[in-house]
Image (spheres, rainbow, N blue to C red):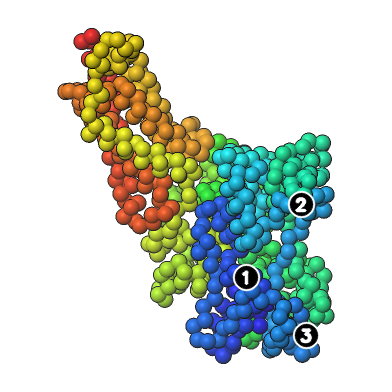
C-alpha cells in the first residue's frame, strides 16, 4: 500500500509492478485530480506545457493495481496493519510505503491570511495563479529559490508588475556575487523587479491584499502575494501512528521506519538528519525501498541531487560539490552580455563541482565528469578560461556523444543507457520515460531525447508569439492587396485642400515617404546584424524578432503611401516585386515560428527553413535595387 500519489509515490508503484509479477499495489491519492508531475508545474504555469502533459497516471495492465483518487488516509494502525480513509473505511496492507510529501512552510508575516495570498505547491494552486495572471494583477513573489524564480518569470505578462523578494541567496547559496548578478540581470530582462534590500514586514488590505509593506518602510501596491518559501515534511500521519519522527519521518538506509513493514520515501522522509526536497533523491529512495521489499537490498546513497531550474531557453544548475578550500582550484568564466557564468571546482585535475548560469552545450559532459570522477586532459582549464568551454572540438550531436554523457541530469541517465534501451524497442519519449525516468522530471532533456529517437518535440513558446503571428497575417493581407487591389484614384477636383497624388508625384512628398520607407527597411534589417555580429548579441532574440515584424508591417504601410498600390514599371516594378516577395516570405517565416510550439511536424520545420532561405536571398537583392532606384530617380529628375 502506498499513501501519496506524487512523483515519488507513483515511482514506487511503477517499480513494484515492474519488479514483481506477484505483488498487488494500492495507491491512495488525497487530491481529487489524477496523479501529475509536480516538478513541471511551473512550466504549466508559464504556458509552456499543456495540462495533459502533466499526466503521471499509473497504468493497470494486469489487474494488480488499485488507485483510490480523492481518498485521503486519516489514520494508520500499525499494530493491525490497516489504514483508515476519510470515509471511515479500513484498508489492510502487508507492506506500507508513506509518500505524503511536504507542505508549504509559509513565513510568519502579518496579514498572510488575507484573500489574494497564495502558496504554489499543487495543480489547483497553479490554476488559481493562472487566473490571477490573466486578470492583470500586480504580484509579489516571496522566495528566491528555483521555484520562486520560475514562478515570478511565469507570472509576468506585458501588462502587470511582478516583484521577486530575494532574502539571503538567489537560486542557491553556492552562488557568488558575480553569478547572482548575471542571474539577476536575466530575471530583470524578463520584466521582473528584484527586491533585495528589504523584506516583507506586513501584507496590507481590508480582507484582501492591497499592498505589502517592507522593512525599510516602502509600500508596494500589489493585489497578489505568492509564497514560494520552502517546504516542511508532512509527518503528522506517521507521528500519530507512533512512528518515530524528527524534522521528517525517520528512516534508515533502506527507507525503513522504526515500525515493521512501514517505509517512508520522498520529501516526508528524513535520512541521517536530511530531508531531501528534490525529485532525484526521492526517486532513488523509491527504488531503494522497492528493492528491499523484493529482496534486492541496496542502501540509499544519500546524494542530494542536482539543483537546477529552467525557464524556456535559459537554465541554471549546481552540480556536485562546489565547496572551495585550499586544496581545490576554482576557475570562472563569465560573459555578462550573454548572461553566462560558469564556475568549475577542481581537486587536482579531477572536476568535483560546477555552477552553471545560462545555457551550456557541455553541461552534460561536465556532469559526466563529476559523476564518473575522471580526470580532464591537460590544457582544458586554460581552454575554459579563454572561451568558456573545456573541449576544443565543435559541438557534437547527441548521437555522437560518448556513452557516459549525462542526458537527463535529474536522474543521471546517460546516452549509453538510452541507446541500450532503444535497442530493446523503446523508441518513444513515453517509453523512455517509463523505462528510465528520463525526461519525466523537469522535462528539460526532452529535446535531446527527441533528437536521439528522431521524434519531434514541441518547442518552447516564443515571446510575443501571438503578436508576431497576427502581424504576419496582416502583412500577408496587405501584400495581397498591393498585388490585386485597384490603384488609388487621383482627385477629380482641385477644390480639395490636399491632392493625394502629390504624395505619389510631388517631389518633396515622394522623397519624404521614400526615405521613411528606406529607414524602416534598414531598421528591420538590424535583426540580421543581431544574429551575425557578436557585439550586437544583446537582449532577447524574441524581442528583436517582434520589432523586426512590426517594422516590416509599418514598412508595408509606408510602401502603400509611397506608391498608391502602383507596382510601377521597369526597374521600379522589379524593386516592388522583390520587396513584396521578401516581405511575404518573411511573414510566412513569422507565421511558422510563432506557431512552431503547436505545429510539431518535421515537414513544417523544413518549410520554415526553406522560406527563410528564400527570404534571405531576396533581402540580399534589395540594397542593389534600392541604390539603382534612388540613383535613377535623382538622375532623371
Q: Position of residue 616 (x, y in %)?
A: 31, 36
The label on residue 345 is: none
Q: Position of residue 56 (x, y in %)?
A: 55, 69
Query: Which secondary structure, mark 3?
Result: strand
Query: Which secondary structure, mark 2?
Result: loop
Q: Is residue 552 left or right of residue 176?
A: left
Q: Earlier in the sequence, mark 2 or mark 3?
A: 3
Which quadrant holds the N terminus?
bottom right
> Residue placed at 52% from the left, 81% from the top?
60
Q: Earlier in the sequence, mark 3 or mark 1?
A: 1
The label on residue 32 is: 1
> Which residue is nearer to you in this view: 499 or 58?
499
State the image quarter where residue 258 is shown.
Answer: bottom right
> Which residue is nearer to you in this view: 481 or 583?
481
> Residue placed at 50% from the left, 63% from the top?
53
Distance from disc 1 to disc 2, alpha carbons, whole Å, reads 25 Å
> Residue placed at 34% from the left, 11% from the top?
497
Which quadrant holds the C terminus?
top left
The label on residue 77 is: 3
Amino acid at each position: 500500500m502506498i499513501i501519496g500519489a506524487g512523483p515519488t509515490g507513483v515511482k514506487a508503484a511503477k517499480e513494484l509492478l515492474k519488479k514483481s509479477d506477484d505483488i498487488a499495489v494500492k495507491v491512495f491519492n488525497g487530491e481529487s485530480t489524477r496523479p501529475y508531475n509536480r516538478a513541471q508545474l511551473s512550466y504549466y504555469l508559464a504556458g509552456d506545457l499543456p495540462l495533459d502533459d502533466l499526466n503521471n497516471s499509473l497504468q493497470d495492465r494486469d489487474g494488480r493495481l488499485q488507485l483510490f483518487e480523492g481518498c485521503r488516509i486519516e489514520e494508520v494502525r500499525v499494530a493491525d496493519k490497516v489504514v483508515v480513509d476519510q470515509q471511515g473505511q479500513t484498508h489492510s496492507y502487508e507492506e506500507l510505503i508513506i509518500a505524503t510529501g511536504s507542505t508549504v512552510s509559509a513565513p510568519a508575516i502579518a496579514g498572510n491570511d488575507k484573500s489574494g495570498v497564495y502558496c504554489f505547491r499543487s495543480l489547483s494552486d497553479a490554476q488559481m495563479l493562472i487566473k490571477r495572471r490573466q486578470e492583470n494583477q500586480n504580484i509579489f513573489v516571496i522566495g528566491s529559490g528555483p521555484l520562486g524564480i520560475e514562478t515570478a518569470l511565469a507570472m509576468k505578462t506585458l501588462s502587470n508588475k511582478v516583484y521577486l523578494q530575494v532574502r539571503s541567496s538567489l537560486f542557491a547559496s553556492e552562488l557568488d556575487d558575480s553569478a547572482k548578478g548575471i542571474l539577476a540581470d536575466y530575471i530583470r530582462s524578463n520584466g521582473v523587479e528584484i527586491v533585495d534590500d528589504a523584506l516583507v514586514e506586513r501584507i496590507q488590505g481590508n480582507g484582501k491584499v492591497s499592498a505589502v509593506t517592507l522593512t525599510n518602510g516602502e509600500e508596494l501596491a500589489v493585489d497578489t502575494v505568492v509564497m514560494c518559501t520552502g517546504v516542511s515534511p508532512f509527518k503528522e500521519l506517521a507521528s500519530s501512528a507512533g512512528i518515530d519522527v524528527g524534522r521528517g519521518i525517520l528512516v534508515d538506509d533502506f527507507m525503513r521506519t522504526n515500525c515493521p513493514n512501514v517505509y517512508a520515501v520522498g520529501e516526508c522522509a528524513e535520512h541521517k538528519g536530511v530531508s531531501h526536497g528534490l525529485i532525484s533523491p526521492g526517486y532513488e529512495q523509491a527504488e531503494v525501498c522497492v528493492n528491499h521489499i523484493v529482496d534486492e537490498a541496496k542502501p540509499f546513497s544519500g546524494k542530494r541531487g542536482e539543483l537546477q531550474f529552467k525557464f524556456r531557453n535559459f537554465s541554471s544548475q549546481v552540480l556536485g560539490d562546489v565547496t572551495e578550500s585550499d586544496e581545490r582550484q576554482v576557475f570562472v568564466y563569465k560573459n555578462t552580455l550573454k548572461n553566462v557564468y560558469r564556475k568549475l571546482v577542481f581537486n587536482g585535475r579531477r572536476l568535483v563541482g560546477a555552477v552553471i548560469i545560462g545555457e551550456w552545450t557541455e553541461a552534460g559532459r561536465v556532469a559526466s565528469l563529476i559523476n564518473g570522477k575522471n580526470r580532464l586532459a591537460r590544457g582544458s582549464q586554460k581552454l575554459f578560461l579563454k572561451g568558456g568551454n573545456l573541449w576544443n572540438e565543435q559541438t557534437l550531436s547527441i548521437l555522437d556523444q560518448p556513452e557516459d554523457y549525462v542526458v537527463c541530469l535529474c536522474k543521471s541517465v546517460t546516452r549509453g543507457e538510452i541507446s541500450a534501451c532503444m535497442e530493446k524497442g523503446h523508441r518513444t519519449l513515453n517509453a523512455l520515460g517509463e523505462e528510465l525516468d528520463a525526461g519525466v522530471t523537469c522535462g528539460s532533456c526532452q529535446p535531446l531525447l527527441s533528437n536521439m529517437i528522431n521524434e519531434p518535440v514541441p518547442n518552447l513558446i516564443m515571446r510575443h508569439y501571438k503578436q508576431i503571428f497576427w502581424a504576419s497575417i496582416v502583412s500577408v493581407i496587405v501584400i495581397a492587396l498591393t498585388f490585386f487591389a485597384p490603384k488609388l484614384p487621383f482627385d477629380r477636383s482641385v477644390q480639395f485642400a490636399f491632392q493625394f497624388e502629390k504624395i505619389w508625384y510631388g517631389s518633396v512628398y515622394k522623397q519624404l515617404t521614400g526615405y521613411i520607407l528606406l529607414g524602416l527597411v534598414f531598421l528591420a534589417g538590424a535583426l540580421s546584424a543581431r544574429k551575425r555580429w557578436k557585439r550586437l548579441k544583446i537582449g532577447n532574440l524574441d524581442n528583436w524578432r517582434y520589432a523586426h515584424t512590426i517594422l516590416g508591417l509599418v514598412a508595408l504601410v509606408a510602401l502603400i503611401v509611397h506608391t498608391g498600390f502602383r507596382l510601377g514599371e521597369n526597374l521600379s516594378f522589379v524593386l516592388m516585386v522583390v520587396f513584396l516577395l521578401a516581405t511575404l516570405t518573411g511573414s510566412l517565416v513569422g507565421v511558422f515560428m510563432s506557431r512552431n510550439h503547436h505545429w510539431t511536424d518535421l515537414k513544417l520545420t523544413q518549410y520554415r527553413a526553406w522560406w527563410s532561405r528564400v527570404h534571405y536571398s531576396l533581402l540580399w537583392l534589395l540594397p542593389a535595387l534600392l541604390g539603382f532606384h534612388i540613383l535613377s530617380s535623382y538622375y532623371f529628375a
